[in-house]
Amino acid sequence: MTKVNGKPVLSKTGEGRLPGDLTAKERIEQILRVDHAGELGAVRIYEGQYAVLKNSEDAATIQHMKEQEEVHRKKFEQLLGERRVRPTLLSPIWSVAGYALGAGTALLGKEAAMACTEAVEEVIDEHYQHQLEELGEDEAELKAVIKQFRDEEIEHRDIARANGAAEAPGYELLTTAVKTGSKLAIWLSTRI
């Protein structure tokens, strides 16, 4: 293990693994499964938001973010197939829940939709950063994909902030609930 800027950089995924920890292969499978689930959920959130806000001045912004999420979802579907990893069994639930969350927050107003986006993307930023720290240089291609997608998720978070997320009614309550739900979905998707 080497260090860059004081942070460890793994040459091999799973380096430093302790007894009882997942093997590198198991962890990669878990990463692909949860990231695919998250991108599916994100697509559905934006589809729900777009369904409600399609005639608003924010429609093009929501469409742009949705299109990026669709690229992310398709890439993780490709990686699941290439590595013969099954998706989470919770995908149908995340599809419905994502759409309901997107449409529900959009019904509360543009600002609430943006607060939802901000909250989800903050969780995903941290989630992807953690994965980047876990993956070794032996997974350079996967790291590059996750890095690119993380950068785009940060862009979505910043767009949401610039478009009034903090002005949503009940902002603190809404964002806390969305973050908690997102973290629970991540936890469940790594296991089921």
Image (spheres, grey):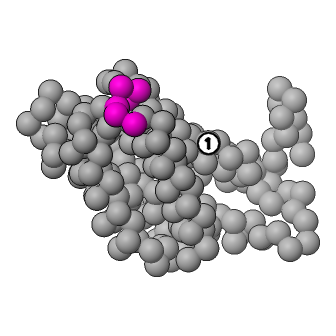
**Residue 83 seen from this side:** no
Q: Nearer the viewer, residue 179 or 66?
A: 179
Give the amino acid at mark 1.
Glu
Q: Residue 84, position in %: x, y?
A: 53, 76
Q: How many marks?
A: 1
* Extreme-left residue of the structure: 55
Give the residue displayed 81% in from the left and 41% down from the top.
9
Packing grade of label 1 (10 A; few <14, some 14-19, many >=20) is few
Q: Residue 141, position in %: x, y?
A: 59, 49
Q: Residue 73, position in %: x, y?
A: 39, 56
Residue position marked by numbered label 1 in the rendering = 126
Describe residue 75's horizontal placement relative to residue 112 as left or right. right
Describe residue 192's horizontal placement relative to residue 117 as left or right. right
Range of magenta residues: 165-170
Give the residue displayed 49% in from the left and 68% down from the top.
80
**Residue 53 seen from this side:** yes
**Does the stretch in magenta take in 132?**
no
Determine whether 164 is above or below 44 in the image.
above
Determine whether 155 is above or below 180 in the image.
above
Determine whether 159 is above or below 43 in the image.
above
* The C terminus - image quarter: bottom right
Q: Residue 92, position in %: x, y?
A: 35, 73
* The N terminus - image quarter: top right
Give the residue displayed 28% in from the left and 58% down from the top.
99
Which element carries disc 1, helix, strand or loop?
A: helix
**Does the stretch in magenta take in 167?**
yes
